[in-house]
Image (tube, rainbow, N blue to C red):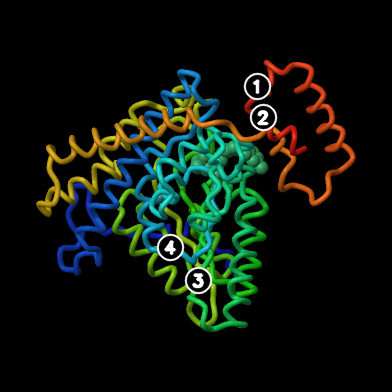
């Protein structure tokens, strides 16, 4: 009788391409299959996420928006993985995937419309900031921060893609890609979604962003096993652990995962990207209360994904300090301009809160709508009735 002790099984290795000096870890292997233009585009997208985050975090502190979440430390995970997907691949996200939206063509105007909740936001201003709706424009479903709900949704989407491909083989081969955190992987939805995808052989890439924390809970208090990737193996899913601060490793792993996910009519694949949440969880959090600043500093300086790609670009003679300064100033200016423009645009109709939920309003919703009309008519200044007058008429 041989019980297998977890401690007797070696931990899964971590896949790297670059070392921390921005050089190939294994000089004998071929360089990444990435053009200079691609690497430069990725770097600027990572910078954009970074700069937008710092501006919007401050804007929240100044009361210009109610909430914000930054991605520092995870820029390579998002930009590098999204770069390996195709436009017909269906994506579901958690909430820290700004780089995925950006890499797929969500513009600064799109981000700012949602953050300022103006009438150009496809979500009609009804969601908290960072809950972007990208289905129509970039094939990324609306962000839902009810943890892990996006995982079975993605399995469902992958199953639908598989059925579609069987019915019409001329369609472009497509996978579902599902992003979630290490904390979300503790939810039951995660396990159900993996098992269904494995049994039904759905073409899906489960992309775990393991950033070490679920708000104030470190992964050491979240699980005692060897992280998330081994859970994939438990469900019979090919799985890999990858250095999430190394954009070339992220890109190569996602590209290979996509190839495998489409093999033999479809199968799930899981990637666990190891990184670190450098910033606070959100504008509602103060991470100084529960972790050491020395630890944060190490990740910020020694394992910073943005600096790492910058060093690689400099080593190739593709980038220098001068260009970096120019790019940062240019990006900063565009973001500030877009924010101001977005704030000037009118808000969505208030009556839009009743749209898209029920085909016919429920009795309670009908009562709420009537109450809204009553209040808006009684206190026209308070409810900015001029802005919403069309909405009221349309009710
Ligand atoms: C179902 C549910 N439970 C709890 C929360 C509160 N909550 C919001 S974010 C979060 C932590 C999630 O951590 P992780 O999945 O690792 O993502 P990260 O924030 O690190 O990117 C929690 C517990 C929630 N949004 N939804
Ligand atoms: Mg986390």
Is residue 200 in view?
Answer: yes
Q: Which circle's residue, 3 or 4, is located before the other in the chain?
A: 3
Which quadrant is home to the C terminus? top right
Pick the residue in front: 380 or 171.
380
Q: Which circle's residue, 3 or 2, is located before the other in the chain?
A: 3
User: How far is disc 1 from disc 3 in space, using C-alphas?
Assistant: 46 Å
Q: Quadrant of residue 36?
A: bottom left
Tell me the residue that label 2 is attached to.
388
User: How far is disc 3 from disc 4 in space, using C-alphas?
Assistant: 21 Å
Q: Quadrant of residue 156?
A: bottom right
Nearest-to-viewer mark from 3 and 4: 3
Nearest-to-viewer mark from 4 and 1: 1
In the picture provided, is 107 more to the left or to the right than 203? left
Q: Mark 1 near mark 3, Cβ–Cβ under 8 Å?
A: no
Q: Mark 1 near mark 2, Cβ–Cβ under 8 Å?
A: yes
Tell me the residue that label 3 is attached to.
174
Tell me the residue that label 1 is attached to.
384
- Residue density around tag 3, few if under 14, some if 14–19, many if 20 or more, within 10 Å: many
């Amino acid at each position: 009788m041989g019980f297998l002790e977890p401690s007797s099984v070696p931990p899964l290795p971590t896949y790297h391409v670059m070392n921390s000096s921005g050089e190939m870890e294994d000089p004998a292997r071929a360089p990444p299959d990435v053009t200079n233009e691609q690497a430069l585009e990725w770097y600027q997208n990572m910078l954009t996420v970074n700069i937008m985050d710092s501006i919007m975090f401050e804007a929240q502190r100044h009361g210009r928006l109610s909430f914000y979440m930054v991605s520092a430390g995870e820029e390579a995970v998002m930009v590098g993985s999204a770069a390996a997907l195709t436009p017909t691949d269906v994506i579901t996200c958690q909430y820290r995937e700004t780089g995925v939206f950006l890499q797929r063509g969500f513009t600064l105007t799109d981000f700012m419309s949602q953050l300022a909740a103006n009438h150009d936001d496809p979500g009609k201003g009804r969601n908290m900031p960072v809950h972007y709706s990208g289905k129509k424009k970039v094939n990324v479903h609306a962000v839902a921060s009810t943890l892990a709900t996006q995982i079975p949704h993605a399995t469902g989407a992958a199953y639908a893609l598989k059925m579609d491909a069987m019915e019409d083989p001329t369609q472009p081969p497509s996978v579902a890609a599902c992003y979630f955190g290490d904390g979300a992987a503790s939810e039951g939805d995660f396990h159900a979604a993996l098992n269904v995808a494995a049994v039904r052989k759905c073409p899906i890439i489960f992309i775990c962003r393991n950033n070490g924390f679920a708000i104030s809970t470190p992964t050491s208090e979240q699980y005692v096993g060897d992280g998330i990737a081994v859970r994939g193996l438990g469900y019979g899913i090919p799985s890999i652990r990858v250095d999430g601060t190394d954009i070339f490793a992220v890109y190569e792993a996602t590209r290979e995962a996509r190839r495998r996910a489409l093999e033999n009519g479809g199968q799930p694949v899981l990637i666990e990207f190891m990184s670190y949440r450098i910033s606070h969880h959100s504008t509602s959090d103060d991470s100084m209360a529960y972790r050491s600043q020395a630890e944060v500093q190490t990740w910020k300086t020694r394992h910073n994904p943005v600096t790492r790609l910058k060093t690689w670009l400099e080593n190739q003679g593709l980038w220098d300090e001068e260009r970096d300064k120019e790019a940062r100033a240019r990006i900063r200016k565009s973001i500030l301009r877009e924010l101001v423009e977005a704030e000037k645009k009118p808000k969505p109709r208030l009556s839009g809160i009743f749209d898209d939920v029920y085909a016919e309003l429920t009795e309670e919703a009908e009562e709420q709508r009537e109450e809204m009309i009553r209040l808006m008519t009684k206190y026209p200044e308070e409810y900015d009735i001029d802005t919403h007058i069309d909405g009221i008429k349309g009710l």
